[in-house]
Image (cartoon, rainbow, N blue to C red):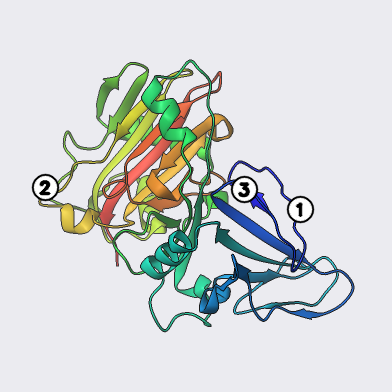
Amino acid sequence: MTDLRGHRYPVKNQALHSVPAGWYELHVPYCGQRLEIRDIQINDCSIRHLIYTGYYTDGQGQRHQPATAVWDTGGVFTIWLHTELGVLFQRMMQTIRNGDYGQNLFERYCLTVDRPEPVADQWPANIRSFFDQGDGPHWWPQDDFRLPWRPAPLDPAEFPADRVVQELQQYLPHQYQLGPGFSTYTLKRLSDLPFIEIADIDNQFVREFVEAIGYRRLIDISLQTLDPGAFIDIHRDDHYNRKAYPYMKGCKKFYWCVQNSQHTKFKLGHSGCIPHHRPLLINTIEHPHSVINQGTEPRISVLVYGDMP
């Protein structure tokens, strides 16, 4: 088993173990013999149908669910458990709908894991504490407005990051200083209606970029720079009273960290630090978030709001 901070605790089947309270990722590897996992018990109590929140990753790296067995070399069964059964049942039953157990949850949900992310003492106490808290696994329904993030359809290979930055710097007319070490170029002074029709974008590259994300009409574009050692304090985006809110609600905000992503931490509420290896659609209205730049180069990101299906 591995806890949220990456500490490992070896366990054996049908043995008594004493571990610190909290969330653990249990790994059951293939050891040369096919095994059917019929039940998992914590403190002599079965987790019952919650066993179907586990999944099997075979030796070729393919993920299988439902799957409560191990069957090939290099394969491993994985499931998240909590030492307090009440916490485990509460979390899973609150996030997973009745009737979905025994189905492939990855087709209907996004699994995130909020892990503690210790950061340097240079950051304010509230930032350090925010990143250092880990709330464990969450299954988010894909059709729920609280879904924190999902992959964006844009293929970065078709839009080189350097070209995106160059075109947007030339196209976006407004420039603001949002805070110490935090600045932005924007298309509008305020991200709100009226829409800008795609055909009215007079830059072909920008027009194709927005269309590739999947927007039918545009609300706003931002190109943000966060300097080395700078941070964005914990907040939620306050768009509730804007006319555009129905089009911003949920995972509708395009986010792509195009420079210095490897040294940037972006924590999005209980979903934890978001992945930076590809563009995303994120939900910064429903989830408190904060960003820090731990590198020596500026962090540059592209953000877009618009009307999408």
Residue type beneath disc 1 = Pro
Residue lying at 29% horizontally and 20% vertically, measured from the top left: 179
CA gap, disc 3 to disc 2? 42 Å
Residue 33: percent from left, percent from top: 87, 77
CA gap, disc 1 to disc 3? 11 Å
Residue 225 is at least partly visible in this image: yes
Residue 198 is at least partly visible in this image: no
- Quadrant containing the C terminus is bottom left
- Which residue is nearer to you in this view: 289 or 211? 289
Q: Residues within 10 Å of mark 2 (few under 14, many from 20)?
A: few
Residue lying at 36% horizontally and 66% vertically, measured from the top left: 94
Instruction: Tell me which label, 3 or 2, sits earlier in the chain.
Output: 3
CA gap, disc 2 to disc 1? 52 Å
Say which residue label 3 marks. 3
Residue type beneath disc 2 = Arg
Tag 2's secondary structure? loop
Residue 209: percent from left, percent from top: 40, 50
- Quadrant containing the N terminus is bottom right
Label 1 near label 2: C-beta < 8 Å? no
Rendering quarter of residue 224:
top left
Report whether 164 appears left or right of 188. Answer: right
Give the vertical position of 175 relative to 23 (above or below). above
Q: Which mark is residue 190?
A: none
Report whether 103 appears left or right of 60. Answer: left
Say which residue label 1 marks. 10
Label 3 near label 1: C-beta < 8 Å? no
Q: Which mark is residue 242?
A: 2
Residue 242: percent from left, percent from top: 11, 47
Residue 58: percent from left, percent from top: 75, 70
